[in-house]
Amino acid sequence: MKKFVVSLLVILSALALFAVTVTPVLDVSGEFGFELLLDESALDINGKLDVDFSLSIPVEAGPGSFSVGFKLQPEVEVGKSGDYDPTKPEDHTHPASFTLKDVLDYIEYKEDAWLLRYEPRAIKLSDYTINQFTSATGALKLGLTKYNLSFELADLAAGEVTPHKDGKLSLPENWILGLKYDLDIGEELKGFAATAFKFEDKENNRFSLQGKLTKSPLPGEETVDLVFALLNAGVDSKNAYRVYVDYAYPVTVDGIKLKPHAYFKAQEGLPEVFKPESDADVRKVIDWPDARKIGAGFDLEANPAPFKIGITDTFTIDFLDMKDLKYSLNLKPSFEYAVTDFKVGVGVPMNFTFGTPLKYTITPNLYTVLGIDNLEVAGNLYYFLADVKPDNQLAYMADVTYTYNVLQSGLHLGNEARDPRGNIVGANDLKALHWYLFLKASVKF
């Protein structure tokens, strides 16, 4: 960290030496706090520190401006160092090292009509050309702002150039060239077209093209996403495509919100053609799996105070395997009564896959929340119905929370089962009650 601070001081001192007027822009945001947890058999006391530090240093340079940006998101761990020796006094000074990618965010020269930007990573163009999971050691972007055009050249491997060394003239390897046009015509038309060519060597290269429309003069809400990609990997060439169209037409009639909607999705080969990016996308932020589906539904919602009544539904035909068509229906009716400091409601998600035999899950959820000044009491009941009957069907939960300024204390108890993301997916035995107490405080800045 000291090296980072010293580097910034050197840059600022150099600018001052040449009498260049700079006004650094510092932005620090994040969250800090602590938490005490106590359950049936254990005690935990944890601290939380999440800091996003960014510094931009713009410099006037003739008709344009030259700027550099730094960004740091340190992972802070409190505890004993790796070389801890119980026979010696504790050393609470832990070394920290930051690479160029950790600290440098961008370097950019900008004029009214164009800009040239460097980042020590790939600069995202779109999901299926150059995205946030594309691995690169650095990239240059030329933006023609008046024409909504962006050109990008990304370097896939560092340290390949050897200055002052003779060699045979040949096409450089390990790079990506990308182009993007942003379609932005007022509020009537929004979208983009992007393409990229990835060249690792003569036997391994990839071409991709994506066009996406998110707003058009048509009434309603629409999304059109078209993708084509071709991977040349020697004798093992592959191609991929994606066609996705989604349309909804929300209207309100006599206070009732109506929303007919439909979609079509067909895509194949994306995980293979974009294998490095797909593997790096651990949380699957981008839609990769093969699919061929068409679906439609009609949602409605009414809010005659203090009531709220609604239903969402989608009927889907899955024809990924034309010899084994799959039909499914996702349906969720809901009802809620809410007044000041009190609400009670029920939602019933239902999923049916039609076939022999019929597969289904139905999960009624009854909930209530009562607020008394700074005290909140909440309860939930879930009942799990399925074609394969679970061992335990009833899940219950209760939460009591008291809030005072930034301090929050409370109790949670229940027998619910959750997935790694915290979603409630089942019930443990009715006697398998778990509980924990907590005291926590946090502030966002």
Image (tube, grey):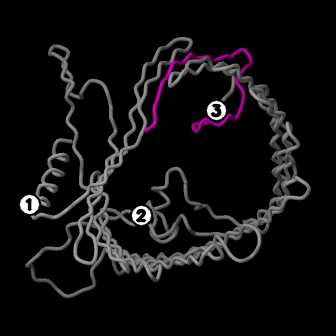
| C-alpha gap between disc 1 and disc 2 | 39 Å
Task: Judge by depth and name the residue closer to the eye, 38 or 6.
Answer: 6
User: As displayed, is residue 88 above or below residue 297?
Assistant: above
The residue beneath circle 3 is 418
The residue beneath circle 2 is 134
Task: Judge by depth and name the residue closer to the eye, 145 or 233.
Answer: 145
SS category of the residue bearing label 1: helix
User: Three-letter amino acid code at disc 2?
Assistant: Thr
Task: Judge by depth and name the residue closer to the eye, 378 or 366.
Answer: 378
| Image side of residue 2 versus residue 398, left or right | left
Q: How many other residues sit within 10 Å of disc 3, few (<14), some (14-19) or many (≥20)?
A: few
- The magenta segment is 418-445
**Residue 433 on the magenta span:** yes
Question: Which residue is most to the right?
Answer: 254
| x and y percentages locating residue 94 in the rendered image | 21, 31
The residue beneath circle 1 is 17
| C-alpha gap between disc 3 and disc 2 | 32 Å
| x and y percentages locating residue 310 in the rendered image | 85, 46
Residue 200 visible to an observer of this rendering: no
SS category of the residue bearing label 3: strand
